Image (spheres, helix red, strand yellow):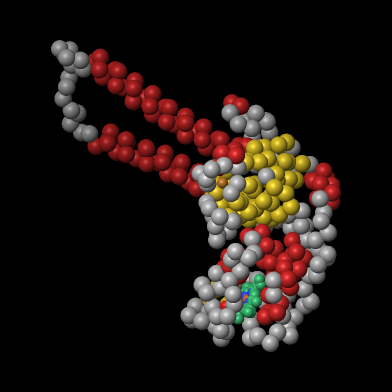
């Protein structure tokens, strides 16, 4: 794959860069052909039918064939562009099942990255080349947007929502990361670098930055330190649901509806506990919004994911 990208406009550093560029150039080409065609016809007609020129100015009797042509042909072209871009879009929105997840929290004005192994970094994101990477993103404050032009990926990052993005980097190097939602005073400085490394160098980088505490283990420590285990633990005197193996469980709520316990449900249970009350329980859980950062909540979710019903969960210092 060439490093300069098509016509060297932008580096071409992810697997979906080239297909997207092809679509873009096809549309530029199509627009150019149409624009040039319209201008050529306009000039020809200006000359041929100019004032005083003896030309046949009567409409053709049977205009149906030409009307059908200029309706059906553009329709087919538009449908072609639609199907082509829809295919690319669907692909870009669906991370493959073997993608590695890395967590991103945006805040005024920095990018905080957490790797599942517990490695943390700010305004840099180290990723291995050739491995599909899925970013799970949320914001600590206002709307931000994660944009890496060389990868042709961009996704808004919203408070109280999880949005995701995926890419497979195809070239070793440093690529600029931008925030592309105006997010306050230092918005223009809110950027960073995505550092693409060969997989072995990446593994060494992970080792060097190993904190000894995986994300799930940090979550387990928070679960005790913040008093969650006091209510949700096995020996709690409070009537609260057992959280072991909660991830993916179907939960019955007090308003009669059911939800699947996904990342956002667990996030909201912690930060906005009044939003959804589990059927059969009193709404006594305090809100931890303001007390826990979004990064902490991601650690708690990672911990709850690592638990299984009736199985002793991950402890501090162990990997999930
Ligand atoms: C004062 C006791 C108490 C504390 C402290 C507490 N919870 Fe809860 N929690 C509850 C109760 C009661 C419910 C069920 C009622 C509801 O949905 O609010 C609940 C519900 C939940 C649910 C949804 C459970 C389900 O089955 O759908 C999650 C997830 C949760 N808590 C996580 C946490 C975490 C993480 C912490 C610590 C940061 C925590 N809780 C702290 C009492 C508590
Ligand atoms: Cu921003």
Q: Quadrant of residue 303?
A: bottom right
Q: Which residue is depicted at the point 67% across and 62% down? A: 296
Which residue is at a point 58% across and 28% down the rendered structure image? Answer: 9
Look at 37% across and 38% down and name the residue there: 74
Residue 148 in view (yes/no): no
Taking the image as shown, residue 275 lies to the left or right of residue 114, namely left
Residue 238 is left or right of residue 71, and the answer is: right
Residue in the picture at 25% in, 17% down: 46
- Confirm whether residue 275 shows in the render: yes
> What is the x, y in percent for residue 295?
66, 59
User: Which image quadrant: the N terminus?
Assistant: top right
Front one among 33 and 267: 267
211 above or below 221? above
Of 52 and 207, nearer the camera is 207
Residue 63: x and y in percent read 22, 34
- Specify the quadrant of the image occupied by residue 168: top right
81 lies above or below 319: above
Q: Position of residue 315 (x, y in %)?
A: 80, 70
Total marks drawn? Answer: 0
Return the x and y of residue 142 as percentages of the image width and height: 53, 53
Establish if 70 lies above or below 138: above
Q: Is residue 96 above or below residue 43?
A: below
- Left or right of 142, for residue 121: right
- Quadrant where the C terminus sits is bottom right
Q: Is residue 241 left or right of residue 184?
A: right
């Amino acid at each position: 794959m060439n490093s300069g990208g098509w016509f060297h406009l932008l580096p071409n550093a992810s697997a979906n860069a080239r297909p997207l560029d092809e679509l873009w150039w096809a549309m530029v080409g199509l627009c150019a052909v149409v624009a040039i065609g319209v201008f050529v016809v306009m000039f020809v007609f200006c000359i041929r039918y100019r004032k005083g020129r003896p030309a046949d100015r009567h409409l053709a009797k049977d205009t149906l064939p030409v009307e059908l042509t200029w309706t059906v042909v553009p329709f087919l072209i538009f449908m072609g562009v639609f199907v082509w871009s829809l295919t690319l879009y669907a692909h870009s929105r669906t991370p493959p099942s073997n993608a590695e997840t890395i967590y991103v929290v945006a805040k005024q004005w920095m990018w905080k990255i957490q790797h599942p192994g517990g490695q943390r970094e700010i305004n840099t994101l180290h990723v291995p080349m050739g491995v599909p990477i899925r970013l799970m993103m949320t914001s600590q404050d206002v709307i931000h947007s994660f944009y890496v032009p060389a990868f042709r990926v961009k996704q808004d990052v919203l408070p109280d929502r999880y949005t995701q993005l995926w890419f497979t980097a195809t070239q070793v190097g440093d690529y600029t990361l931008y925030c592309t939602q105006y997010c306050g005073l230092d918005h223009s400085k809110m950027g960073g670098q995505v550092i693409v490394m060969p997989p072995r160098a990446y593994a060494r980088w992970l080792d060097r930055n190993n904190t000894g505490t995986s994300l799930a283990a940090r979550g387990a420590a928070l679960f005790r330190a913040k008093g969650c285990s006091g209510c949700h633990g096995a020996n709690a005197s409070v009537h609260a649901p057992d959280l072991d193996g909660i991830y993916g469980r179907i939960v019955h709520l007090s308003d009669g509806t059911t939800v699947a316990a996904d990342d956002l449900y667990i996030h909201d249970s912690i930060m906005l506990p009044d939003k959804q009350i589990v059927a059969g329980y009193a709404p006594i859980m305090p809100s931890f919004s303001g007390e826990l950062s979004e990064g902490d909540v991601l650690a708690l979710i990672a911990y709850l994911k690592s638990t299984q019903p009736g199985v002793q969960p991950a402890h501090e210092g162990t990997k999930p």
